[in-house]
Amino acid sequence: SITSAKIKVNGVHLHYQQTGQGDHAVLLLPGMLGSSQSDFGPQLKSMNKQLFTIVAWDPRGYGHSIPPVRDFPPDFFERDARDAVDLMQALKFKKFSLLGWSDGGITALIAAAKHPALIYKLVVWGANAVVTQEDLKLYNAIRDVSKWSEKVRKPMEEMYGHEYFAKTCEAWVDGISQFADKADGNICQHLLPHIKCPTFIIHGGKDPLVPQLHAEYLHKHIKESRLFLMPEGKHNLHLRFAEEFNKVVENFLR
Ligand code: TYC
C-alpha cells in the first residue's frame, strides 16, 4: 500500500507518499511543478518493496505542499535541497539514496554535494548543472502553457487549476533564467566535485528539453559516476519506459 501524509519541515507542511519496507530508503524528487502523484506513479507502484522504503515528496509550493505559493528566489534549488534532506531526517531515515528527475535532479545533486555523510547513492536523469543560451530558448518555448501538449498540461491543470499552473510556469522560467546571468550559467557546477557517492546519470537520447551535453557534463565532473543512455527515451523516460528504468536503477542501488 502507498500512504500519503504531511509533515512540518522548515515551517512548511510538506506532502509526501511512502511505500515499501526495505532497509534501503530512497527519496524520489519530482521536476518543475511536479509532485509525487504526477511524476512517480510507476516507481511507487513497481519498485521492489522488500529492498526499498520509497518516499516521494512534493517540494514547497508544488503538488499538495501548498501553501506556500511557489516562488523562485535565486537560491530556490538550495532551499529545495535543504527541505528534502530535512524531510528525510524528520522521517527518521539516517542514510538514504536520492532519485531526482530534471529540476529534482538538480536538487538531488546539491543535496548530495552538501550532505555526503547522509547520502548513500544518487540517481539523476534529465538534469543539468548549468544553463546555456540554447537552454534559455527552450525554457522560453514552454513559458506559455497553452502551447504545452494536452497530455502534459491536463494533469497539471487538474492539480493546480489553470491560473496557478500558468503563473507558476512563468515564474519558473524567470527563476531558472536567472542562472544564465551567472558566470558560465552556473547552477551547481561548483558543487559537483563535492559529490562523493556512487552516482548514476541517465539520459534520454531523444530528450527535446535537456540536451545530452548536460548529462555528459555531469558525468565528466562527478568522480564516481556512470552514464547510461536510453536511446529512445525522451524527458519522461522513467514514465514511458518505467520497467527498464526501474530495473537499471534497482540494479545500481543494490
Ligand atoms: N526542468 C524541467 C523539469 O523539471 C523540464 C524542462 C527542461 C522544461 C527544459 C523546459 O526547456 C526546458 N521537468
Image (spheres, helix red, strand yellow):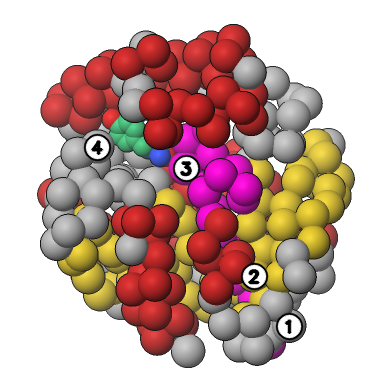
How far across and how far down the image is residue 30, in percent? 52, 48
What residue is pinned by disc 1?
21
Ligand 1 rendered quadrant: top left
Q: On residue 238, which mark appears?
A: none
Alpha carbon separation for disc pair 4 and 2: 27 Å
How far across and how far down the image is residue 212, in percent? 15, 50
Which residue sits at x=22%, y=25%? 138
Which residue sits at x=33%, y=63%? 241
Q: Secondary structure at mark 4?
A: loop
How far across and how far down the image is residue 174, in percent? 41, 16
Residue 232 vertical placement versus 171 (above, below): below
Q: Earlier in the sequence, mark 4 or mark 2?
A: 2
What residue is pinned by disc 3?
31
Residue 41 vertical placement versus 49 (above, below): above
Q: Earlier in the sequence, mark 3 or mark 4?
A: 3
Badge 2 amino acid: Ile
Magenta segment: 23-40
Q: On residue 209, which mark appears?
A: 4
Label 3, residues with CA under 10 Å away: few <14, some 14-19, many ≥20: many
Q: Is residue 33 visible?
A: yes
What residue is pinned by disc 2?
54
Badge 3 amino acid: Gly
Alpha carbon separation for disc pair 1 and 4: 35 Å
Q: Earlier in the sequence, mark 1 or mark 4?
A: 1
Alpha carbon separation for disc pair 3 and 1: 25 Å
Which residue sits at x=45%, y=81%? 250
Alpha carbon separation for disc pair 3 and 4: 12 Å
